[in-house]
Amino acid sequence: MPLPVVPDLSIVVPLYNEEESIGPLVDAVRDALGAAVSWELVLVDDGSGDATVQRAQSLAAADGRIVLVELARNYGQTQAMQAGFDAACGRLVVSMDGDLQNDPRDIPLLIAKLDEGYDLVAGYRMRRQDKMITRKIPSWVANRIIIWLTGVRIRDNGCSLKAYRRELLDQLHLYSDMHRFLPALAAATANARIAEVPVRHHARRFGTSKYGLSRIAKLLADLLTIKMIASFRESPLAMFGFGALASVVIAMAFAAAWLWPFAQRTGPLDSAHVNAYVLPGSALLCVALAAFLTMLGLIAEEALQKARFEERDDRIAARAVTG
Ligand code: UDP
Ligand code: MG
């Protein structure tokens, strides 16, 4: 029996209701890559309600290089990409959108750059063909915030056309909407070497965009998570401990403000001070908050420790398998 051929390059494409784009997309990938490299195209159907799956199935049946991953429901672009990364066999992996807005003719440029020794090559869209108010301006602001928060200077985080080394993807786990700042995540968690190349961008020809302005709230929440991962990944207790310390200082200030009139007292006790509950109550609340934050920090440390042990076990198991 012939051994299955493992491709050098996997192209991962998430698809949600892209029935009209999928045929031209597969043709465009074939034209761009030809037979010069061994490749596979991993199509991930993210619970489409149209004919995307049926069309993808017949395309996969006709060409052995096309792999179809079917998700049970609509999980979102990030989760679809992660499912595609998990299924991909290539030493190098490229992600791109399935709506023909990215151009497969740019893939060889990304790969050439990756071969210069980078772990991740991010495309940035020249002359981006999207709406100004709902797309380009929010995206511009988001890119500035990402640079400011993470220190990773990537021009166009939202461009899906990116290339990665397998080893890098193995260290990442994408959830929520995190594909949008994959470079920052890669830099923070895996110390990835990152480069950028300009890529083409086309207006959507078929179907509609799956996003509106509502993505902004999710993006901000994810950014906070990234910032936390980047700053306190090694020691969450340090972050929570800092909060606990600040609470203790505030508690002491409340206690001092409460006790001060007693220390100053020369005559009989002022009933207004004796009956005042606000200051001692606030001090107690701050002490409770400090205790709570310390406990959270300890739990986070414990979870991190567990994750490290699991990582170590995985490494040992992988070594055992490879001999
Ligand atoms: N997509 C997906 N699941 C979703 C939303 C989008 O797989 O829940 C896919 C979509 O089919 C497309 C890519 O993600 O291939 C980018 O989506 P879209 O073009 O709507 O985003 P935009 O280009 O408008 O930012
Ligand atoms: Mg699009």
Image: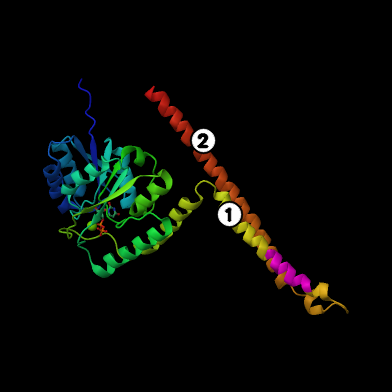
- Tell me the quarter of the picture where residue 282 sits: bottom right
- Tell me the quarter of the picture where residue 220 sits: bottom left
User: Is residue 162 visible in the rendered structure shown here?
Assistant: yes
On screen, 255 above or below 180? below
- Tell me the quarter of the picture where residue 71 sits: top left
User: Is residue 75 visible in the rendered structure shown here?
Assistant: no
Asked which secondary structure carries label 2, the reply is helix
In depth, the one of 235 and 148 nearer the eye is 148
Q: What residue sits 12% from the left and 45% below the top?
A: 27
Is residue 184 toward the left or the right of residue 232 in the image? left
Please provide percent x and percent y for residue 94. Answer: 25, 44
N-term mark: 2 or 1: 1
How far apart are labels 2 and 1 at the CA level?
22 Å
Please provide percent x and percent y for residue 114. Answer: 27, 42
Q: What residue sits 44% from the left and 32% below the top?
A: 314
Q: Quadrant of the C terminus?
A: top left
- Which kind of residue does numbered mark 1 sit on? Phe
For disc 2, the marked residue is 309
Q: Which mark, residue 262?
A: none
Please provide percent x and percent y for residue 223. Answer: 42, 57
In depth, the one of 204 and 127 nearer the eye is 127
Q: Which residues are magenta?
A: 251-260
Is residue 150 toward the left or the right of residue 132 in the image? right
Asked whether disc 2 touches disc 1, contact meaning CB atoms under 8 Å apart, the reply is: no
On screen, 307 above or below 159? above
Determine if the magenta segment contains residue 253.
Answer: yes
- Which kind of residue does numbered mark 2 sit on? Phe
Please provide percent x and percent y for residue 107. Answer: 20, 45
For disc 1, the marked residue is 240
Determine if the magenta segment contains residue 143.
Answer: no
For the stretch drawn in magenta, the main secondary structure is: helix
**Few, some or many residues within 10 Å of mark 1 (<14, 14–19, 20+):** many
